Image: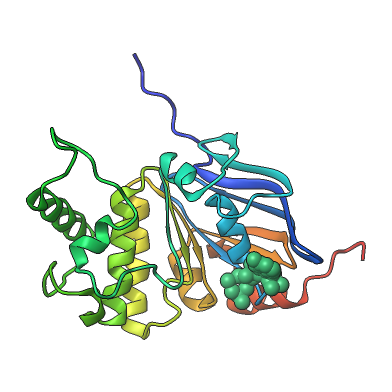
Amino acid sequence: MSPAPAPECVVGCRHVAKSFGHVEALRDANVAVRPGEVVALVGDNGAGKSTLMKTLLGINRPDRGDVIIDDRPVKLSSVRDAQALGIEAVHQDLALAPHLSVVDNMYLGHEVTTGPFGVLSRRSMMERADAALRDLSIALPSLTVPVRDLSGGQRQAVAVARAVMWARTAVLMDEPTAALGARQSEIICELMRTVASRGLGVLVISHDLPRILKAADTITVLWRGETVLVSPSADLTVPDLVATMVGYRKESA
Ligand SMILES: Nc1ncnc2c1ncn2[C@@H]1O[C@H](COP(=O)(O)OP(=O)(O)OP(=O)(O)O)[C@@H](O)[C@H]1O
Ligand SMILES: [Mg+2]
């Protein structure tokens, strides 16, 4: 039997609208991420980027339009539904538990049940977490150190590694370099490329335009809840992007 063809769109949405009371956060949001592709979602503050990411994760339910996973429209009712379809996220606040160790954080939010007693042994947990970190060339002092004792960049790397360890389809990241210095931001951008090279889709929200233009294959611009540009990053410059993000006017307007 020949293997199923790779999907064209591992995660995305078509014509999504979402309002919170009188605030129309999304009007016509469209995005598509192919396997092995890094797509950057950019836009001014309040453009709807985080709302869109939460919609792709089942945290928000769209008022109109479709969320697409593996080329199919899906109805997501919770983050669990998105996880069951292989989608993982790195939120801006990282959602790590500072007092817990690296290895415990890698398993946080994922019930591990295996073996006769339904519990994965501590040793297997350590081995799997260690392999996941090594696979991404992430060096940490130890896996048993509490996460609060790591640097900001190391914490970010743990959050990325956790997402990658569980993701089968795509990883979504909301401003993963926002709190980082230049060197650690570079490392996270390299991580994104490594994750994509494994065949996963990567959707990343960022305000760091110079860096994201280099790291992403494709740029999608949201302007007031609407997708107004989808372009290969190689065809864009930072001034082009800024003009589109802040000054977009519909030709008909
Ligand atoms: N849960 C919510 N309840 C009410 N309004 C919301 C909610 N979530 C988002 N909004 C509003 O929707 C709009 C889009 O917000 P969103 O957080 O998606 O923007 P963003 O593009 O991520 O901005 P930033 O770059 O500042 O993070 C904003 O006007 C925001 O106040
Ligand atoms: Mg946001």
Query: Closest to the observer: 45 or 194?
Result: 45
The residue lying at 7 percent from left, 52 percent from top is: 123
Quarter of the image where one finds residue 202: bottom left
Residue 47 seen in the figure: no
Give residue 118's position: percent from left, percent from top. Answer: 19, 38
Seen in the picture, residue 220 relative to 100 is either above or below; the reply is: above
Q: Is there any visible trace of residue 155 in the rendered image?
A: yes
Q: Find residue 248 and report its image quarter.
A: bottom right
Where residue 73 sits in the image (x, y, percent)? 61, 36
Residue at the limit of the structure toward the top, as seen here: 1
Q: Is residue 152 left or right of residue 114?
A: right
Indicate the quadrant containing the C terminus: top left, top right, bottom left or bottom right: bottom right
Relative to 4, residue 81 above or below: below
* Residue 212 on image: x %, y %: 48, 70
From the image, which quarter does the N terminus lie in? top left
Q: Is 13 on the left or on the right of 161, as rendered?
A: right
Q: Is residue 111 left or right of residue 222?
A: left
